[in-house]
Image: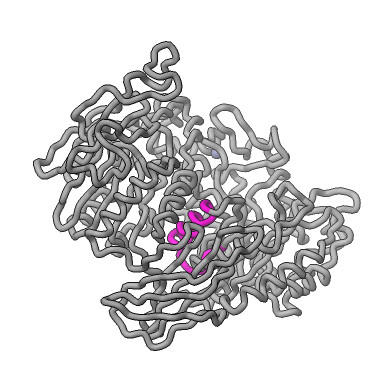
Amino acid sequence: MQWYKRSMFRNLVDMHIPNGEGYLEEFDPEQYAKCMEIAGVETAYVYASNCLGLCLYPSKVGYRHTITEKRDIFGETVKALRKRGIGVVGYLNSWNTEAAKRHPDWQIVSSNGFIRGEHTRFGTCCPNSPFRDHFLAMVHEMVSTYDIDGFWVDMIGFFAPDCTCKWCREKYKAQTGQELPDTINWTDPNFINYVRFKFDSVSQYAQEVSDTAKKARPGISVSFQCAGWNRAMDYGLHDDYYRTMDYVSGDFYASRHKTEVICRILPNLSENMPFEYMVSRAPHLSYHTGLKSKNELLHQACTALLCGGSFLFIDAIDPNGKLQEALYHTMGDIKRELMPFYKAVDHDAKILRDVAVYINFDSYTQRTAEGQPSHRIGDYRDIALNLEQINLNFSRAHIDYDILTEKNIHRLSDYKVVVVPDLYRMSQSECEKLAEYVAQGGRLYISGASSALSTDGTNKDRFMLSKVMGVEYDAFVDTQPIYLAPTQSGEPWFPGFTAEYPQMLPFAVPTATQISDTAQVLATLTYPLTDARDFRRYSSAISNPPGRVTDIPAVVYHRYGKGACLYSCAPIEQNKMDCNIEVFNKWICNLLEENGGLTLQCEETEYLSHVLRHNPQKRCYTVSLLNSQNVKKIVPLYNLEFSLKLDVQPKEIYTTLGRNVSWKIKEQFLHLTIDKLDLFDVVYITY
Ligand SMILES: [Zn+2]
């Protein structure tokens, strides 16, 4: 079994220390390894080079840290860890200030002239430049020389909206016969080719790094930094990137809802489980001192665990090479609390979820970016931000959900409801698969301008999914806010709103025309008397009351094949107002209801998260429970009640922490009551 399948508790010590008198002189590999032992670290990620490009081993191909004139601190640490039976992952960083300084022409140059190394401490070299060979030589040397179980690379990607370095220009010209485009134009084949070129540059580089490492040490694991998943357009990370590694991994500084989003998408981007969730022991990497509280770190580890993820905590070394031992004692306490759960982790159990949110990386651009200089592609829509709101919405409705990308589009049929949140650019193949999903009985919620532009640029301002939606794209109308005015038959779908007092949303939206006789219009579009941005003319100074009633279909329910589609011109899932969240959740619950209902029902607080799993070989269901009521200080939940739709007769029901569970079966539901939940627990239902 690969080490990463059983190692759930890991550490990385940042060592971004420059050359200098005395720096790293007091580094003690025994203290380092002892700290790992105290914390119960199963696998330690150790720096072989840092973001400055300085190798911490006596490299013959890379730039060496001055400490390596006397010592091989990477090699000494590997030995000290091995002696204690702790697994080792060798760390290299693809950022390289030293290389950027010595080879200015290797650097990533954005079309707005920005060169990171000239304005920050960090030099970034283009993967299309000779830096690629420099880095691959480091990979081969380090991986073939040292006894390591895995290999991890930080900062692969462009981290810039575009690159116009001479290497990119030459390579692009050789591949396409064209010059780099200078304007964002989603129907210009040259611009579309360039975006693809950027994604491919990163994934092909990552693939070469991975191949080099696996050739240098057969059987080794390879993984790369994936924290930039939500900035696909400017970092250059697409689905292919995640295929180049054994498991995905990333360091995050996120709130509860964002953390839950990350822990829902990473497993689906990962080729293997567990994915790896990394957090700093400090409030942020820029804080050298200060620790997060024990509860906060434990809560983050449990959020990852809820979704089957391993946990890695990041420390930072002092410039003299010392570590602060106190942290490792705290981490040891955390590890002891996690152990009963880690021992029982079952990566073979299948997560059962009724709802999936489908996203793609091509859509995360601003519609208004069109016509702007190409470096403005970095004016992205933050994927995580949109999903964070959906996570909050679903936590209110007690819906556990998945996040899929094109990498897992073949799994659509596992879900009763699929949500497509305003995906402007979609491919023909994605649309065909979504249409097939609905035809076979799935329920699709789709919003905004989804599918109005094809990724290849050949379709614009026509819904590629119009047959499924029952409406066709008409025009984008730049008026905001807009109102959704329920029709008579649509009123039950709009709790709290009527045609006279319709639902306001602060968006400008596309209009549509009904093209199917069977489409049921649940709401029509009403415009405000005056636009919110007009400060000279208004009908009410602070709000923008509805006034211009139209018969434009705004929310449409349409049966298609054995399934149905609910289209909303407004991406209401992105609105944070309670009254609108209630409407969105009502829609999703209605769709769920007509397709079999929720498998796991729960009416507890929105601060409770749950994940249901099933392992048919072990004849066992599990429900993992996480209490996020108060991250700083645990406030227990008492007498938690659940209903689980079950077609088997339970034999034994218990929790990892041995809580009292009472249960009864009524109709097809197993009703469970758990007497208390502190932070995290897992309920086992064997049959
Ligand atoms: Zn370049």
Q: Residue at x 45, y 63 (%)?
A: 604
Q: Nearer the viewer, residue 630 or 311?
A: 630
Q: Is residue 335 left or right of residue 625?
A: right
Q: Residue at x 63, y 36 (%)?
A: 105
Say which quadrant the C terminus sits in.
bottom left
Q: Which residues are magenta?
A: 257-276
Q: Nearer the viewer, residue 329 or 273?
A: 329
Query: Would you say residue 309 is visible in this rendering?
Result: no
Q: Quadrant of residue 327?
A: bottom right
Q: Residue 574: x and y, percent?
A: 41, 42
Q: Is residue 487 left or right of residue 330?
A: left
Q: Residue 406: x and y, percent?
A: 36, 54
Q: Quadrant of residue 590?
A: bottom left
387 in the magenta segment: no
- Above or below, 366 against 52 in this view is above
Q: Residue 531: x and y, percent?
A: 37, 20
Could you tell me what secondary structure mostly forms the magenta stretch?
helix
